Image (cartoon, rainbow, N blue to C red):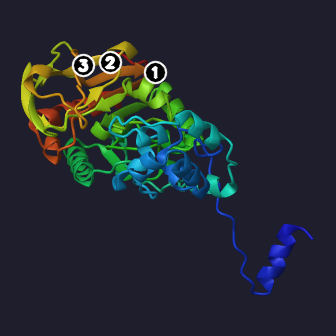
Amino acid sequence: MALAAMAGLFAAAGIATARPTPLLDCPLRDAPFSLESPLVDVLLSPAAKAVVADTAPQAWASLPPMLQGTSAPTFAAILTLRQALQFGGKPVDGLGELDARLHTLPITRTDKVARCARYDAVVPRLTLPGGSGLRLLVFEKINGFRDIPSVNAAHAALAEMAAQRGWRLVFTDHGGAFNPRTLARFDAVVWNNVSGDVLTLSQRRAFRRYITRGGGFVGFHGSAGDPAWFWDWYPDVLIGARFAGHPMKPQFQEARIVVDRSHPLASALPDEWRMTDEWYSFKTNPRAAGARVLLSLDETSYTRVGLFGEALDMGDHPLAWTHCVGKGRAFYSAIGHLPATYRQPLNRTMLEAAISWAATARQACAG
């Protein structure tokens, strides 16, 4: 008897049948376990955890509790197993053996379901406000580090900007919004401190097509602040730089921001200003990816020492920039950890100009 017919008989008899958990097309769903696996995927697998505990017992036992969460949002989603075992720069013996043993583990359906649970395929019902202003989608799905105060402050600031400027703005925390039909309704997408890998493979394709064919992107602070990436196009092409770290001695410092007055978005900005925030450094410079830098940090104005004493000097230190991605426009600003930054007048002026620029009528990108 066919399964569908059997299910019908069970239903007619009042017998409940369990539906299998949907298996999304999430990234790394079928990938073998390795040192480059997201830490969270290892934590979700009893078999993988047992192999790590047996091969690298000391490093595994010393894993900080803050890295051991298995439900999103969690730091474990933005670190690889290798990074977690070497947390703080500690040497770990036997990594080659560990990687080889992990590769031999079968990837079960339970593993695949667990890996995909932090993604979603929910297509939200989004009602745009009336009017003729810019149509903006604010994306707030976070699988990695969720700094609630900064997310909430940016959310409130965007709502205020929209009310003042007549923007037609909606918010969502569903990755399912990244489909061709939904994205086509918007002039630009704003990522509000998004952390962690958040889009399925089909959602990635839809987003990439949207951008390269003329859509706009704006990213705030944490949207480029993950230690590990599992989609190279996002940091290397869309953002144009990879996060290296931020000072911790102290974490928040006043620094001097230098403005490139020749930039199209600089007309309402002074040559420089000072403000306090958490200052990101990057492993790569966005200029190498073709970005046009709007703001830079004066590295002599603050202390650049990371969590484990590492130097975070860049020399040329971009802070906010624009660039073209195909026919699309992309803007990113590393400002935005402290809630007060979203009320700082000059930063607010820059963000308003950047969003308007990114959402300009779809045409060949320039500037």
* Sequence-wise first label, 3 or 1: 3
Residue 327 numbered mark, or none: 1
Q: Is residue 51 left or right of residue 265?
A: right
Q: Secondary structure at mark 1?
A: loop
Disc 3 target residue:
314
The residue depicted at 81 percent of the width and 76 percent of the height is 8
- Determine the residue located farthest toward the right in the rendered image: 1
Residue type at mark 2? Asn
Q: On residue 241, which mark appears? A: none
Question: Which of the 4 quarters of the picture holds residue 305?
Answer: top left
Identified by mark 1, the residue type is Lys
The residue closer to the viewer here, 349 or 194, is: 194
Mark 3 or 2 closer to N-term?
2
Q: Say whether residue 31 is visible.
A: no
- In the rendered structure, are the residues bearing label 3 and label 2 in contact, judged by CB atoms less than 8 Å apart? yes
Type of the residue with mark 3 = Met
Q: Can you give x and y, in whole percent of width and height, for residue 181 in the image?
A: 55, 43
